[in-house]
Image (cartoon, helix red, strand yellow):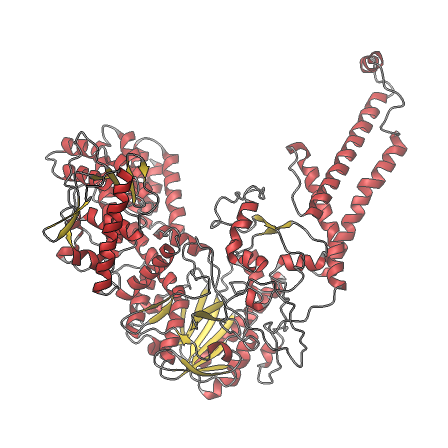
């Protein structure tokens, strides 16, 4: 909508307001007279007027006049209240339901009338010079004729993604705060960083917005990590001189960020972001652009957002190095962690229940590839190190659902700061011995983020074989989401030209300015960020350059193995260091160390991305004896029948917590001590020091790990002695070179659960087993040690969940004939701990049908459909046929 159209709408709204507020009462006064009577009527006059026949319609006309004046007075009052609320930047109190339509009418008219003043201010304000990092276009005679008319070159407004700065420029008066609507891809961290210069101030926005009424259908803000498009937030305490444009150093590129650096104009220098007041942008002209200011391409996110990229306050980015020579960033680690979570949830979805024969045969978890396991551990460590909640598999999937398509990628680090490059319009050539490994790392990260039509990689077949030589290209690699292989680079150029024309027509048809706006209005349109990755022969250089220049507006870029004379070229050593760079992004890349990925590690990662789509996994090998789940389920040494309760209660279901008679121990206990207590509880017969250090600190050298082991024991004893008031007990016993928990002083919910399961295993008939399993729903309240991220903790967490869910399903099988309602409650309890299991949903539907509840069967099937939609899949045909059959009977 153009500014003249907005002004026209504003004038129309102002005219209608004048008619309703001025012309209507004038007409009403001329027809019916004043609303105020000449004198106050007495009670006999009132009763006489009401009792006699209204032959001359005096009473009727008086009633109509009274209603008209009352409606006008109410509308005038609401208009005044909405006007004051708009000027103050706060919503007016919601009126009762009968008056709400009139309030909405007044609010809309006031908002449209304000278009006259806001747009006229924008028109009469001198145009702010485009900052140095805005997109600039240069004519290229080599551009194809059929694409030359598609793209109208645009320059980015510095306040396009900064509503506070734009509003302050339009309205010079100072406001204490104003409201803002959440858009797709927003986080409170990003909004705080853009408005206040620091993302750490996001709690201020959250606290100011918690009680703010939201539009119909949207919940109130109860969690800073859970915000939805369309919600409103308050931005308190804006500075008076917010008319100044934030410098690029105080902002960071994010998905759908219109001011993100673009190829050919931005110079990315990894300098720490500043929180000092922003300075005005340097003036520039089309012929002589101003020198670029340093840009800090930070990618930080809210500290409690699962799957977010963590950063330290000095803008350092976390990296992971493997013994194979692989060096990757936390962005790829987070994406792999999400893929591993999807793989595990698909595994749980397909796993059959051992409900007929319990305990059934063991079904160990397939081993996670070493590179993926290491990246997953580093990603979870990044949450634990900053005190955030460790995300579960379901948390990672839910967070991934809301992630927008990436429009930039972190390719490496320089001086500890991330080096981020924009994807739209990118023309980057990597040259030297480390070029292929660096290109492989970028490609793998984009493929890991490609689900839900967010990214598409276009790679010629010979280059696919160069990047991933160990992959069977007719197997898993051919079915990866986001990977499109073509025969040659010429075919890739033809594909890009067709995509540009398609996207240009879409924007023209929908009358939207860019892809971000189109996806915001129609999220179902598949418009992924498109990147071509190839080795470029010289004859294709000019045509490819023309296509990439046109593709900047349409989310299209290119990454190449080899020099790019028309773009940016970086020479890379075998360890990923950029020794020299030429082109628009040279300042960002010179001296940087790029991420690089070995072919074998890339093969493991692609297999995980393949299984994350729900594809079947290869059968796992038999686990070693010392890691087999059956060996870890050891009955506790302490009998639960003892009359005296233990001094210390170790809670291991849910987050690890210590309790004494005075309550939980919330301070003083180290994270390493909690991990040690968890590991010792899994081995009640004791572990050696070498076993403990290898399990808890596998990445440390033996001397450091031994010191940490002794420190954890010392901290545990000290805290427990202080909490219990006893100086003599050891709590952790050291005997025969082994360490174990003192069973006479310590008890655990895990031990009580293990005892119950062991009693059920030893039962000789169904009656005894049913009686033994009855306490199970009340004992298994949460997953095992949810805040522990060690591999052994994750393995036992999954094993214990499987064991308990199978036991609950078996208990329901034993009781469904005599007590079907009790059996249904048991299955529903199991479903809370394994919500993705199709077999569990089928058992529940069968039992609901047996109880004559077809509506409940449909609801259960719908619940399964909703949960599997998080995994981008749906119930299989067998489940659908079962639902149809049960609803017919």
Q: Position of residue 743 (x, y in %)?
A: 16, 40
Q: Position of residue 44 (x, y in %)?
A: 83, 11
Q: Can residue 613 be seen from the camera position used here?
A: no
Q: Can residue 590 be seen from the camera position used here?
A: yes
Q: Nearer the viewer, residue 302 or 768?
A: 302
Residue furthest to the bottom: 538
Q: Position of residue 145 (x, y in %)?
A: 60, 81
Q: Position of residue 278 (x, y in %)?
A: 61, 64
Count numbered badges in the picture: 0
Horizontal side of residue 872 vs 112, given as left or right: left
59 w.r.t. 582: above or below:
above
Horizontal side of residue 372 vs 534, given as left or right: left
Residue furthest to the front: 727
623 w.r.t. 661: above or below:
below
The N terminus sits in image quarter: bottom right
Q: Nearer the viewer, residue 301 or 795?
A: 301
The C terminus sits in image quarter: top left
Q: Residue at x 40, y 76 (%)?
A: 593
Horizontal side of residue 561 vs 504, given as left or right: left
Q: Nearer the viewer, residue 109 or 486?
A: 109
The image quarter in which residue 847 lies: top left
């Amino acid at each position: 909508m153009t500014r003249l159209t907005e002004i026209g709408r504003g004038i129309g709204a102002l005219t209608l307001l004048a008619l309703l507020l001025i012309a209507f009462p004038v007409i009403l006064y001329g027809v019916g007279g004043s609303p105020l009577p000449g004198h106050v009527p007495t009670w006999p006059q009132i009763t006489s007027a009401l009792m006699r026949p209204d032959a001359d319609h005096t009473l009727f006309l008086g009633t109509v006049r009274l209603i008209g004046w009352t409606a006008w007075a109410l509308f005038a009052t609401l208009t005044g209240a909405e006007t004051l609320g708009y000027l103050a930047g706060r919503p007016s109190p919601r009126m009762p339901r009968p008056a709400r339509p009139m309030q909405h009418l007044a609010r809309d008219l006031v908002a449209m009338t304000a278009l006259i003043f806001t747009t006229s201010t924008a028109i009469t304000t001198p145009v702010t010079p485009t900052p140095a990092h805005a997109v600039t276009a240069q004519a290229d005679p080599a551009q194809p004729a059929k694409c030359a008319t598609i793209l109208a070159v645009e320059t980015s407004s510095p306040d396009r993604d900064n509503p506070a700065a734009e509003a302050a420029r339009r309205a010079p008066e100072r406001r204490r705060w104003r409201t803002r609507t959440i858009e797709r891809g927003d986080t409170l961290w990003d909004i705080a960083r853009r408005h206040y210069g620091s993302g750490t101030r996001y709690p201020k926005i959250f606290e100011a917005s918690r009680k703010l009424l939201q539009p119909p259908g949207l919940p109130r803000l109860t969690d800073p990590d859970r915000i939805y498009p369309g919600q409103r937030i308050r931005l308190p305490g804006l500075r008076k001189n917010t008319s100044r444009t934030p410098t690029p150093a105080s902002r960071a590129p994010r998905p759908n960020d219109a001011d993100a650096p673009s190829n050919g104009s931005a110079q990315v220098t990894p300098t720490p972001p500043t929180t000092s007041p922003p300075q005005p942008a340097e003036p520039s002209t089309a012929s002589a652009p101003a020198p670029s200011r340093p840009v800090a391409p930070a990618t930080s996110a809210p500290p409690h957002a699962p799957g977010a990229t963590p950063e330290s306050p000095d803008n350092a980015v976390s990296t992971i190095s493997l013994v194979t020579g692989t060096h990757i960033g936390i962005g790829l680690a987070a994406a792999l962690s999400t893929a591993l979570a999807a793989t595990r949830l698909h595994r749980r979805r397909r796993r059959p229940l051992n409900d007929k024969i319990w305990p059934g045969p063991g079904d160990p978890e397939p081993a996670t590839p070493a590179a993926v396991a290491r990246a997953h551990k580093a990603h979870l460590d990044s949450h634990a190190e900053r005190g955030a909640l460790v995300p579960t598999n379901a948390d990672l999937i839910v967070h991934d659902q809301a992630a927008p398509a990436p429009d930039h990628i972190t390719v490496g680090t320089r001086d500890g700061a991330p080096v981020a490059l924009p994807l739209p319009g990118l023309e980057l050539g990597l040259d030297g011995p480390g070029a292929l490994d660096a290109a492989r790392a970028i490609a793998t990260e984009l493929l890991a983020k490609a689900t839900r039509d967010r990214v598409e990689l276009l790679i010629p077949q010979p280059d696919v074989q160069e990047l991933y030589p160990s992959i069977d290209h007719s197997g898993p690699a051919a079915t990866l989401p986001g990977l499109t292989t073509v025969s040659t680079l010429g075919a890739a150029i033809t594909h890009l030209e067709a995509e540009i024309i398609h996207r240009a027509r879409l924007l023209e048809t929908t009358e939207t300015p860019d892809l971000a706006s189109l996806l915001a209005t129609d999220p179902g349109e598949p418009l992924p960020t498109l990147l071509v990755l190839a080795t470029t022969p010289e004859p294709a250089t000019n045509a490819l350059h023309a296509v990439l220049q046109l593709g900047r507006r349409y989310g299209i870029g290119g990454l190449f193995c080899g020099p790019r004379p028309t773009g940016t070229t970086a020479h890379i050593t075998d360890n990923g260091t950029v020794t020299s760079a030429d082109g628009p992004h040279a300042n960002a890349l010179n001296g940087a160390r790029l991420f690089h990925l070995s072919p074998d590690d890339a093969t493991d990662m692609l297999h995980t991305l393949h299984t994350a789509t729900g594809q079947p996994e290869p059968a796992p090998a038999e686990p070693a004896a010392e890691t087999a789940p059956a060996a870890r389920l050891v009955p506790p040494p302490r009998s639960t029948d003892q009359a005296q309760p233990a001094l210390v209660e170790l809670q291991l279901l849910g987050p690890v917590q210590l309790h004494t008679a005075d309550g939980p121990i919330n301070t003083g206990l180290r994270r390493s001590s909690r991990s040690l207590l968890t590991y010792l509880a899994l081995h009640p017969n004791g572990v050696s020091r070498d076993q403990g250090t290898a399990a808890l600190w596998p990445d440390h050298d033996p001397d450091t790990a031994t010191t940490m082991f002794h420190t954890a024991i010392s901290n545990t004893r000290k805290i427990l002695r202080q909490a219990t008031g006893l100086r003599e007990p050891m709590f952790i016993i050291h005997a025969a070179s082994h360490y174990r928990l003192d069973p006479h002083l310590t008890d655990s919910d895990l031990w009580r659960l293990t005892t119950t399961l062991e009693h059920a295993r030893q039962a000789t008939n169904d009656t005894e087993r049913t009686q033994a399993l009855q306490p199970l729903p009340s004992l298994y309240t949460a997953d095992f040690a949810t805040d522990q991220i060690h591999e052994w903790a994750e393995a036992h967490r999954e094993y214990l969940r499987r064991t308990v869910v199978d036991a609950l399903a078996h208990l329901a099988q034993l009781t469904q004939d005599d007590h079907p309602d009790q059996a249904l409650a048991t299955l529903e309890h199991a479903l809370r701990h394994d919500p993705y299991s199709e077999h569990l949903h089928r058992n529940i539907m069968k039992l609901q049908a047996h109880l004559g509840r077809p509506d409940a069967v449909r609801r259960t099937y719908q619940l399964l459909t909703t949960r599997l939609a998080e995994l981008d899949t749906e119930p299989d045909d067998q489940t659908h046929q079962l639902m149809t059959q049960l609803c017919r009977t």
